[in-house]
Image: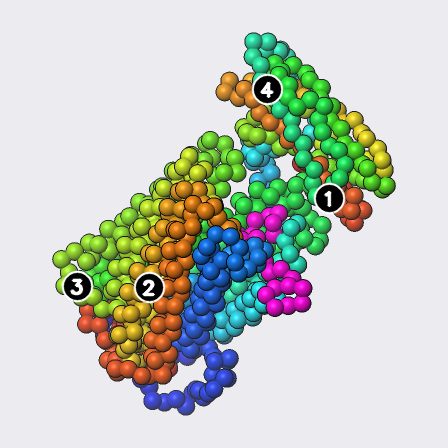
């Protein structure tokens, strides 16, 4: 498809590669920044995972054992925030940084200094957020960390929010600025930095899905910033956007939040679609079935995501016409999503399949993401949503799409591209252990949540009725098992970073396509100083 | 070579500026959603918001062959210790019939208090058919220390009220806005 002038220029005179800490602090290199993003997101994944372990430990048995309900609320809140904004989003930004320039034959991201800034804001943002949890756990008088759920509904987060809500607001603002800058960088890179001949409809699907994700980010993260700004002025400057006493409306908060929140869930899953669309053809040894339909399906999902937000709030009391509109629009999303799933299956159909680690994760993604999509379709039906709303059924649904969906695909991406990043193949034994343990434990963890949810167990409570005890015991076992399994990936990643392992060729997967495989492994510090020729 | 690079950079800057403008515009859009939401609520009665102004026209006819039950519930906002009740808990009215209901609020503290009551109708669909010619919720009410105040509310139902609405609930929540008024020294927007 394309031949690249595999340029590893030896003239490094124009560039003084800094070493040590400075290399990372001042880096404007897309590969270094990608690496920083990926390590950061994995650290946040472990931090958020630790909070999930606290939640599951408390729910292992009925009654109160380890933490008080107040701290439990802080755990559910910060777990959600850290996983959404700290683990999944930065991981996909890291992948974008590493792979988009390589995939489109660009020498770097278009705006390298902004790239540096958008990463280095993040550790500070999360230091502020997680700092409030540390103060709550160990500080004098245990001042409460944010405790209102990751959706921070008013008035829980305005009138009744703890003092640390202001730390939370600052932290969300910083994350938002980081995301917007990252997204702008992707759009500018894709629009202006493509190698000659790399037309839009020749771009790998990962680039396409990320381009659309970037547009979603630029459209809705400012709305989130607006929502937290309104919270801030409600709390301290006498406005009453969400305060009924002053003529505001708490339900308005939900509308604004979910206007951001629903596109946000696609922001987390669209890059995954791109990853899987790269991996499945590589290991089925067939080109992706229906490339153009994949692009259009992604764009349709993105557009539809702006007109479905109120399906998160069917129970606030909307007029019938409103609920019907949001119900049908939500169900409509399953059409382009279905196109994608069928395309992946059609790609595998009669392919010469082999099941290396990335493929295993990708297939698990297709099956389990579809499972989460189906429960989403159930939740879209307004009358039954009244029963499922805020139960563990919802928890099961979004963990299927986010853990076995987004996170599984990020692992698939890591196993697929680690040879390119590090120059060594990821350790197979550890990788297999990681995959099978994660697969089984994730299902033990999340599948029974459907049952307890349908039976009426509400989410975000530190305790539950005795009838749910057995299920919750096994859910917790699954949780601890899944959590520990992720340490196997830490071992895989550290081994790769230390260059311990079988040396990887430029193209370690024989069916893989794309410009990224034209450069040596590990990818040199500078690639495509002269653009490759794309036929 | 250098000329070409410059042009890429220029293009990058141009795209960057466009996207930044878009981001700022979307930040503004979040605030635009507030008046937009209020207008939609006013027009449709979405979310059970009743009109914040007094109805001035009187219904032309009374639909004597229909009765609708209106229930009243009252709630107290944070920190209020006094009484806040309605004289009647439910009334059966004919659409078009003008009805008076008394609400009572008391201030057992030793300080004067400014209160604001916020109405909400459930199901929200009924809100636009509820017309109030007089309501204590239209203005802030001052309760002197130790005072028990009679707060009347006069309403009628639109004769056009759809047949399937046979019953609805009008809820009032009373808030102490003394500090808010003192702190801002300007009037509070009331819906």
Using the numbered discs, state the Cα–Cα distance from disc 4 to disc 2 in whole angstroms. 57 Å
Q: Quadrant of the C terminus of chain A?
A: bottom left
Do tag 2 and tag 1 residues touch (Cβ < 8 Å)? no
Mark with earlier residue (4, 1): 4
Say if mark 4 contacts mark 1, CB within 8 Å: no
Q: Quadrant of residue A524?
A: bottom left
The answer to whether residue A193 shows anywhere in this view is no
Q: Position of residue A495 (x, y in %)?
A: 34, 80
Which mark, residue A438?
2
Q: Main secondary structure of the magenta part?
A: loop
Q: Residue at x 62, y 11 (%)?
A: B62
Badge 2 local density, few (<14 within 10 Å), some, or many (20+)? many
Pointer 1 residue: B79
Residue A145: quadrant of the picture: bottom right
The number of callouts visible is 4
Give the foreground label among 2 and 3.
2
Disc 4 sits on a residue from what chain? B
Labels 2 and 3 share a subunit? yes
| B42 relative position to B117: left or right | left
Mark 4 or mark 2, which is nearer to you? 2
Query: What kind of element bears circle 4?
Result: strand
- Residue marked by disc 4: B69
Query: Residue A58: x percent and y percent?
Result: 49, 58
Q: Are marks 1 and 3 on the same chain?
A: no
Q: What's the residue at 74%, 40% (across, down)?
A: B80
Left or right: residue A278 versus residue A76 is left
Cα separation between marks 4 and 3: 68 Å
Measure the alpha-carbon separation of dots 1 and 3: 67 Å
Residue under numbered circle 3: A353
* Residue A141 among those drawn in magenta: yes
Residue at image x 31%, y 65%?
A437
Magenta stretch: give its range: A136-157
């Amino acid at each position: 498809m394309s031949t690249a002038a595999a340029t590893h220029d030896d003239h490094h005179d124009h560039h003084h590669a800094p070493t040590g800490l400075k290399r990372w602090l001042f880096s404007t290199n897309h590969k270094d920044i990608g690496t920083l993003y990926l390590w950061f997101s994995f650290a946040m994944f472990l931090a958020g995972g630790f909070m999930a372990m606290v939640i599951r430990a408390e729910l292992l048995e009925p009654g109160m054992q380890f933490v008080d309900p107040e701290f439990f609320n802080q755990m559910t809140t910060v777990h959600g925030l850290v996983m959404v904004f700290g683990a999944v989003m930065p991981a996909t930004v890291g992948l974008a940084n590493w792979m988009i320039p390589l995939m489109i034959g660009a020498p770097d991201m278009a705006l390298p200094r902004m790239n540096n800034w958008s990463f280095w804001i993040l550790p500070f943002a999360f230091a502020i957020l997680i700092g409030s949890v540390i103060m709550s756990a160990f500080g004098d008088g245990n001042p409460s960390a944010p405790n209102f759920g990751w959706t921070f509904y008013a008035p829980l987060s305005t009138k009744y929010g703890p003092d640390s809500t202001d730390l939370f607001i600052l932290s969300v603002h910083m994350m938002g600025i980081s995301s917007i800058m990252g997204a702008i960088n992707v759009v500018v890179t894709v629009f202006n930095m493509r190698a000659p001949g790399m037309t839009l409809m020749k771009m790998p699907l990962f680039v396409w899905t990320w381009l659309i994700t970037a547009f979603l980010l630029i459209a809705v993260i400012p709305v989130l910033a607006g929502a937290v700004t309104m919270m801030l002025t409600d709390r301290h400057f006498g406005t009453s956007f969400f305060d009924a006493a002053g003529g505001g409306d708490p339900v308005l908060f939900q509308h604004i939040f979910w206007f951001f929140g629903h596109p946000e869930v696609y922001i987390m899953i669209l890059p995954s679609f791109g990853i899987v669309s790269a991996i499945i053809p590589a290991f089925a040894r067939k080109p992706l079935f229906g490339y153009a339909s994949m692009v259009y399906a992604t764009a349709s999902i993105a557009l539809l995501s702006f007109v479905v937000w109120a399906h998160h709030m069917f129970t606030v009391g909307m007029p019938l016409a409103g609920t019907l509109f949001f119900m049908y629009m939500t169900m409509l999303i399953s059409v382009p999503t279905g196109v994608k799933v069928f395309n992946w299956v059609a790609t595998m159909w009669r392919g010469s399949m082999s099941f290396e680690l990335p493929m295993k994760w990708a297939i698990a993604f297709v099956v389990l993401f579809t499972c989460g999509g189906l429960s989403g379709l159930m939740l879209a039906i307004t009358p039954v949503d009244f029963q499922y709303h805020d139960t563990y059924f919802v928890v099961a649904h979004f963990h299927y799409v986010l853990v076995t969906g987004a996170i599984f695909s990020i692992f698939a991406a890591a196993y697929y591209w680690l040879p390119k990043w590090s120059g060594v193949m990821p350790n197979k034994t550890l990788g297999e252990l990681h995959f099978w343990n994660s697969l089984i434990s994730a299902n033990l963890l999340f599948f029974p949540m459907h049952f307890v949810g349908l039976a009426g167990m509400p989410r975000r409570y530190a305790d539950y009725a005795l009838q749910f005890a057995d299920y919750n015991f096994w859910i917790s076992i699954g949780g601890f098992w899944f959590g520990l399994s992720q340490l196997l990936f830490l071992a895989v990643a550290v081994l790769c970073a230390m260059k311990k392992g079988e040396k990887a060729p430029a193209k370690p997967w024989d069916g893989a396509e794309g410009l990224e495989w034209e450069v040596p492994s590990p990818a040199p510090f500078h690639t495509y100083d002269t653009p490759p020729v794309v036929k | 070579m250098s000329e070409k690079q410059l042009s890429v950079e220029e293009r990058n800057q141009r795209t960057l500026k466009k996207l930044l403008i878009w981001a700022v515009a979307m930040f503004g859009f979040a605030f635009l959603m507030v008046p937009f939401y209020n207008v939609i609520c006013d027009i449709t009665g979405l979310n059970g918001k009743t009109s914040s102004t007094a109805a001035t026209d009187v219904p032309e006819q009374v639909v004597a062959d229909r009765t609708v039950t209106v229930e009243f519930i009252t709630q107290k906002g944070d920190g209020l210790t006094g009484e806040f009740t309605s004289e009647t808990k439910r009334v059966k009215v004919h659409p078009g019939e003008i009805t008076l209901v008394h609400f009572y609020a008391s201030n057992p503290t030793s300080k004067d208090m400014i209160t604001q009551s916020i109405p909400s109708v459930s199901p929200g669909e009924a809100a636009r058919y509820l017309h109030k010619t007089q309501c204590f919720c239209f203005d802030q009410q001052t309760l002197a220390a130790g005072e028990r105040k009679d707060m009347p509310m006069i309403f009628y139902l639109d004769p056009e009220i759809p047949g399937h609405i046979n019953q609805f609930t009008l809820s009032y929540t009373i808030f102490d806005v003394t500090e808010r008024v003192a702190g801002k020294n300007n009037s509070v927007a009331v819906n």
